[in-house]
Amino acid sequence: MNPLLEPATKGEHCKVMRGEDMRELRLRVTIPNGVEFGDLHLSRNPEDGLVRFEMAPIEAICEASALDLDELVQGPQPLVGLFIAAWYEVHLARGGVPDPVQEDLIEEARLETEHGGGFTYAPGHA
């Protein structure tokens, strides 16, 4: 079994995410003390809308969780976007401040699902 998808053990944060095939995936991670969602510094490239973020928090989480960073970010089915979305849900549930870039991404995904996809909004205009 892929170690990224194994059940979580005690003391680890367990995030439930849905993949493209709509299966539930469990990604077990440990968020090190001092690492916060805001450390990602999410932004969008104004020309193409691609999401940019700092890798240091992702690297720290992978190291603390004994996860393969390359597989998370560049594997055959990269999970980093799903991971960031799941981390954001936990961040908000724990009283974290909303992130405007992540909120924009959530709204874009909602609109694409609601309208069956096939269109995109310019960055920051969902």
Image (tube, grey):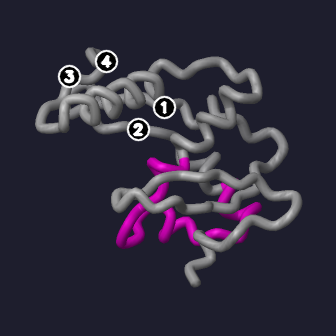
- Relative to residue 108, is residue 32 depicted above or below? below
How far apart in space, not on screen, are marks 2 and 3 (Cα)?
15 Å
Assign a secondary structure to mark 1.
loop
Asked if the residues shown at circle 4 and circle 3 are in contact, with their CB atoms under 8 angstroms apart, the answer is yes
Pointer 1 residue = 42
Pointer 4 residue = 124
Which quadrant would the N terminus be assigned to in this image? bottom right
2 vs 4, front mark: 4
Pointer 3 residue = 122
Question: Disc 4 marks which amino acid?
Answer: Gly
- Relative to residue 98, is residue 64 depicted above or below? below
Q: Relative to residue 59, is residue 22 drawn left or right?
A: left
Sequence-wise first label, 1 or 3 = 1
The crowd level at tag 1 (other Cα within 10 Å; few <14, some 14-19, many 20+) is: some
Give the residues in magenta: 60-83
Q: Nearer the viewer, residue 119 or 66?
A: 119
Question: Disc 1 marks which amino acid?
Answer: Leu
Pointer 2 residue = 52
Sequence-wise first label, 2 or 3 = 2
Q: Quadrant of residue 20?
A: bottom left
Q: Nearer the viewer, residue 36 or 15?
A: 15
